[in-house]
Image (spheres, helix red, strand yellow):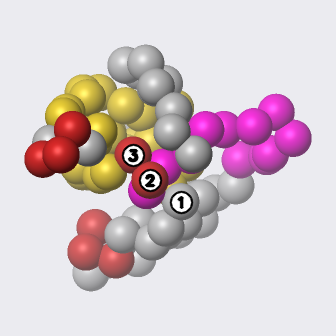
Amino acid sequence: MKMNYNLFTRVALREDLLRYNLQRGDIATIVDKHVGNNNEIGYSLEVFNALGETISVVVVSENQIEPLMKNEILHVRQLEVA
């Protein structure tokens, strides 16, 4: 599904990003938009802990994120130290 996300929109990860210790469903905020090879859209995401502190900034392709839906509920999990 192609979306045109605005900056500072909160999104969910569509897949695990094991390199960053992030899991599918983790919430992130879009902080930049990129146009890559073949006009593929990508985004820089900032990921926060439950206290609002930045824990990671990652770059993903558009197909690795999805919009938040009103029938979803947020959940807290402990971040495993890599």
Q: Residue at x 18, y 46 (%)?
A: 38
Q: Is 43 contained in the magenta span?
A: no
Q: Residues within 10 Å of mark 3 (few under 14, many from 20)?
A: some
Nearer the observer, 46 or 49: 46
Q: Residues within 10 Å of mark 2 (few under 14, many from 20)?
A: some
Q: Is 71 contained in the magenta span?
A: yes
Circle 3: element type = helix
Q: Residue at x 37, y 31 (%)?
A: 30
Q: What span is colored magenta in the figure?
A: 64-74
Q: Label 2 amino acid?
A: Asn
**Of the image marks 1 and 2, the number of the one nearer the N terminus:** 1
Q: Residue at x 51, y 39 (%)?
A: 2
Q: Are dots 1 and 2 in contact, CB under 8 Å? A: yes
Q: Which mark is residue 14?
A: 1
Q: Label 3 amino acid?
A: Glu
Q: Residue at x 23, y 49 (%)?
A: 59
Q: How many marks?
A: 3
The residue to which callout 2 is attached is 63
**Of the image marks 1 and 3, the number of the one nearer the N terminus:** 1
In the displayed structure, does residue 40 sit left or right of residue 14? Answer: left
- Magenta stretch: dominant secondary structure: loop
The residue to which callout 3 is attached is 62
Q: Residues within 10 Å of mark 1 (few under 14, many from 20)?
A: some
Q: Confirm whether residue 50 shows in the render.
A: no
Q: Are dots 3 and 2 in contact, CB under 8 Å? A: yes
In 3D space, how far apart are the residues under numbered discs 1 and 2 (Cα atoms)? Answer: 8 Å
